[in-house]
Image (cartoon, rainbow, N blue to C red):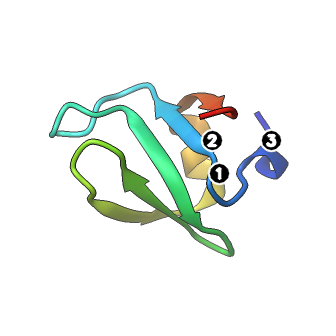
Amino acid sequence: MDVEQLRLGAVVETKKAHPCGGTRWEIVRTGADLKIRCLTCGRVVLMPPDELIRRARRIAEGE
């Protein structure tokens, strides 16, 4: 997985579930930090791109 794949609107599936039970996150802002939103509960989290790459299982491009 590359930083180039982390585009606005991409859906990322994480290895570990959020406390709400969701594992799918949408990228809503890019830059030095990525703003991602849980698709289950709507919680918004900021994290560096390298940390998101480490936590991601795959990127669901077409969803």
Residue located beneath label 1 in the image: 50
- Callout 2, which amino acid? Ile
Residue 2 lies left or right of residue 20; in this view the side is: right
Q: Is residue 51 above or below residue 31?
A: above
Residue located beneath label 3 in the image: 2
Mark 3 and 1 residues: CB-CB less than 8 Å, in contact?
A: no
Q: Earlier in the sequence, mark 3 or mark 1?
A: 3
State which quarter of the image contains the N terminus: top right
Q: Residue furthest left?
A: 20
- Callout 3, which amino acid? Asp
Q: Residue furthest bottom?
A: 32
| Residue 25 percent coordinates (x, y) | 44, 45
Residue 9, image quadrant: bottom right
| Residue 51 percent coordinates (x, y) | 56, 49
Residue 45 lies left or right of residue 61; in this view the side is: left
Mark 3 and 2 residues: CB-CB less than 8 Å, in contact?
A: yes
Q: At x 49% / y 31%, what residue is drawn?
A: 13
Cα distance in 3D space between marks 1 and 2: 5 Å
| Residue 57 percent coordinates (x, y) | 55, 24
Residue 20, image quadrant: top left
Q: Viewer-proximal residue, 12 or 3?
A: 12
Mark 1 and 2 residues: CB-CB less than 8 Å, in contact?
A: yes
Residue 17, image quadrant: top left
Q: Viewer-proximal residue, 9 or 56?
A: 9
| Residue 6 percent coordinates (x, y) | 71, 50
**Count of numbered tags:** 3
Q: Secondary structure at mark 3?
A: loop
Residue located beneath label 2 in the image: 53
Q: Secondary structure at mark 1?
A: helix
- Callout 1, which amino acid? Asp
